[in-house]
Image: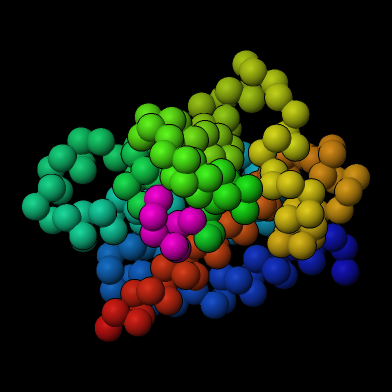
Amino acid sequence: MSAFNERISILNTLYSKIYVSELTRMRLSSRYLDEAVKCFSQNLNISCIVVSSALIERTLFFEKIRRQPQKAGETMRTPTLGGLFKFFIEWDLLRENLLYRIERLNLELMNERGRSKQTIDKEICGSRFIKTRNLFAHGKELLIPIPLSHLLPDNEEALSSYGIEWDEFFNPSIDTIAYVHLIRTLRFMRAYSDFLKKEE
């Protein structure tokens, strides 16, 4: 099996473990999930990044309204991904699935050292999930070329959690970035669908 087909298999296995019926019950369409995986399988990597990011934004937006129905109007006026990350940053589901290990550790250190909210908010908005989304969603990769390896976790986590070998880590393609981004998205959606199922 080729490396690409192996990745498709990993993605499909992850997808199959998501309780899609739970998402549907909460009016969260599975079409974003379908589209994100389909985009990756067809080498539409930028579309994969944008669609999977939109899925996370929509899910967090919905969950925030569910938790604070009295503030729905305010939430609807400010549905930015960075703002949603700030709101949910203490939520294990987000921290464990959408942040890399070093990002979680940095936030813990900042909290321990009593860093200002502004500094912590900046760290959150600088998370690589948000950076990846913004870079490709707004076309910044054309204007501000940066080494794509800056969007990956450290090489140890890249290998253990995503199977990214040494050579690929130091010279990743957009395909690599899209794969890691989509894996994190699917892991979060699986955890979220588990969370919804346990709430029943």
- Measuring from the top left, give residue 129's x and y in whole percent: 55, 44
- Measuring from the top left, give residue 151's x and y in whole percent: 66, 39
List the single residue furthest toward the left: 70
Q: Nearer the viewer, residue 69 or 9?
A: 69
List the single residue furthest toward the top: 143
Q: Is residue 194 left or right of residue 175?
A: left
* Rendering quarter of residue 2: bottom right
From where the camera sits, is residue 38 visible?
no
Q: Is residue 24 magenta?
A: no
Which quadrant is the C terminus positioned in? bottom left
Q: Where are the magenta residues, as a range?
A: 89-95
Q: Is residue 70 left or right of residue 138?
A: left
Q: Nearer the viewer, residue 154 or 56?
A: 154
Q: Is residue 133 left or right of residue 195?
A: right
- Measuring from the top left, give residue 43's x and y in whole percent: 70, 47
The residue under the point 36% across, 80% down is 197
Q: Nearer the viewer, residue 192 or 24?
A: 192
The residue under the point 29% across, 79% down is 199
* Rendering quarter of residue 79: top left
Which quadrant is the N terminus positioned in? bottom right
The residue under the point 33% across, 62% down is 28
* Rendering quarter of residue 37: bottom right
Q: Is residue 94 magenta?
A: yes
